[in-house]
Amino acid sequence: MARLISGRAGCRRPPREPLWRGSIARVPDPRHEPLGIYRDRLFPLLLGWVSRHFDDDRRRLLGEARGRVLELGVGTGASLGFYGEAVDEVVGIDHSPAVLRRAAERLRRKEAGEAGLPHAVILAEADAQALPYDDASFDTVVAFLTLCSVPDPDEAAREIRRVLKPGGALIVLEHVRAHREGRLAAWQDRLDPIWSRAAVGCHLNRDTAAALARAGFDTAPLERYRAPRTWRPASPRIRGVLLA
C-alpha cells in the first residue's frame, strides 16, 4: 500500500505545507477560496472526466518512470495508479487546491480499499515556474497536459531541467500548436482567448516543444501526432521521453 507522507527533503526554497498527511483536513475548502464556483467545483469534475481518456497514454509512458518522480499538474491524481514498481516516491504538485482536494480523496479511497499504491505519495500546492526543490533532486519529471496552462512555459521548462538529475527523464504528453499546418494554427490563435477562459488557463496554441528545446532538451525523440476522435483545434499532440 502507499505510504502517504509529508517531507522536506530536497527542498531549495521553503515549500508550502504538504496537502496530504493521510487525511484531507489541510486541503483548503473551495468554498473559502477566492475562485469561482466553476473553477473550484465544476472544472475539477470535468478534468477528472477528460483525464480518463488518456489512460492508454499513461500505461504506455509512465512505465518509463524511475526512482523519485515529480509530477507537474497532478490534477485529480488520475496518473498515480499507473506508476510501476521502479518508482519509489511520487511528489505530485498543482497550483489548484480544488483539484488537489480531489487527488487527496482519490488516495484516501485507495488506502481504504485493497488497491493501494506500491510507492509513497506526497501532494503539495506549488508553482511549476518556481519549484521548491533542490537541483538534480528527481530521477523523473512527468508533464501530462500541464505545460499548456503554465503562464511562462519557458521558465517551467528551465525548472524541469534544473530539478532533474543528469540522465534523468522528462515524460511529456501535451496538446500543442499545430506543426506545419498554418490554417489550423490560425484557428487555434483565434479560439485561444475563449478556450483559455473556459479551460482555466489552458492554451490551444502553445509551442511546448520549442520551450523544451530552449531549456536544453533534445526534442528529436518527441512524437508529433494528431489525436483521433478529438476536437480538431486540440488534436495536435506531442509525447515522448526526453533525457536531461
Image (tube, rainbow, N blue to C red):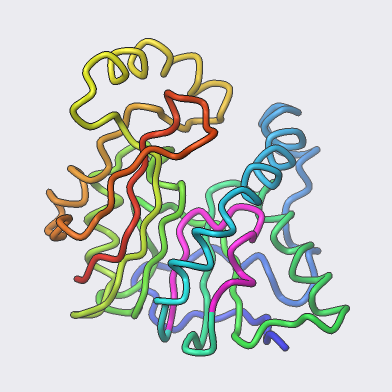
Horizontal relation, residue 88 to residue 153: left or right: right
Horizontal relation, residue 7 to residue 158: left or right: right
Residue drawn 55% across and 81% down?
7
Residue drawn 84% across and 84% down?
114
**Magenta-colored stretch includes residue 73:** yes
Horizontal relation, residue 51 to residue 140: left or right: right
Q: Position of residue 207 (x, y in %)?
A: 25, 36
Nearer the observer, 65 or 36: 65
Q: Is residue 109 above or below residue 38?
A: below
**Magenta-colored stretch includes residue 74:** yes
Q: Position of residue 98 (x, y in %)?
A: 69, 46
Residue drawn 51% across and 72% down?
91
Q: Is residue 64 above or below residue 159?
A: below
Which of the 4 quarters of the picture holds residue 40? top right
Task: Please identify the quadrant where the N terminus is shown.
Answer: bottom right
Furthest residue toward front: 228
Q: Position of residue 191 (x, y in %)?
A: 43, 14
Q: Which residues are magenta?
A: 68-83
Q: Is residue 61 above or below residue 66?
A: above
Residue drawn 31% across and 66% down?
170
Q: Position of residue 181 (x, y in %)?
A: 23, 23
Furthest residue toward right: 112
